[in-house]
Image (cartoon, helix red, strand yellow):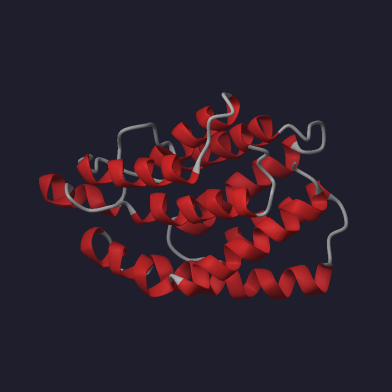
Amino acid sequence: MLTQETARKWIDLFIEQILENKDYLSELDTAIGDGDHGNNLARGANALTEALQTKNPETLPDLLKVTGMTLVSKVGGASGPLLGSAFIGMAKASQDSDDLATVLEAGLEGIQKRGKAVAGEKTMVDEWIPVVEAVKSKTLTSAFIEETVEKTKDIKATKGRASYLGDRSIGHIDPGAMSSSYLFKTMMEAGVYDE
């Protein structure tokens, strides 16, 4: 269930995953981007830990907003503004609804508005769209989250830095989709998504 408590646990678990997998995310990004995805997100994760301790947000919308604003301001590259926009969108939606699908859909809209990305361009959106659909139909599993990440391997990048590689971008997992998969797996782990 999406509450302030479960969302806080979710964000804490996500921070852990990012810090744990920082090198791997940068490795993925080295293959098709500029190699800083993991380091950028780790910087954001550390800033987020600090912001949550200092501000100690007590409501769900405040928690999501602090998360979003911190990611936008502290993470370099495209991932910070995109992920940050997702959390800011989710914060707005959570003022009127605690329905996870509704809140995640607002997050996805935030990413798409900021990044102008659609499905099939090898971006984090290729992870977000199927996951949001699976949350709506109550069919989300960890295995599904992994499958959708794997599928980004077969996509030719037509957006962002990876698009410069053309066909050579095929065969590589999209780093943004991978970091988003950590977000969704920790969401399940924290009990935000009720199976």
Instruction: Tell me what residue is drawn at x 64 percent, y 73 percent.
Output: 47
The structure residue drawn at horizontal position 71% and vertical position 60%, both measured from the top left corner, is: 9
Task: Point out the residue furthest to the left here.
Answer: 167
The part of the image, by quadrant, that contains residue 190 is bottom right
In the image: residue 158, left or right of residue 83 = left
Observer-nearest of 167 and 181: 181
**Residue 190 can be seen, yes or no:** yes
Q: Which quadrant is home to the C terminus? A: top right
Q: Toward the viewer: 76 or 126?
A: 126
Q: Whole-percent x and y of residue 137?
A: 56, 24
User: Residue 63 placed where, x, y %?
Assistant: 77, 55
Observer-nearest residue: 162 or 191? 191
Compared to residue 182, the image places residue 194 above or below, namely: above
Image height of 75 relative to 106, above or below: below
Q: Position of residue 139 (x, y in %)?
A: 53, 30
Farthest residue toward the right? 58
Q: Quadrant of the N terminus?
A: top right
Compared with 181, 105 (above or below) is above
The answer to whether residue 34 is seen in the rendering is no
Residue 96 to residue 77: above or below = above
Q: Going by the image, does 57 lie left or right of 163?
A: right
Instruction: Say which residue appears at 52% left-offset and 41% top-offset.
Output: 111
How many discs mark residues in the rendered view?
0
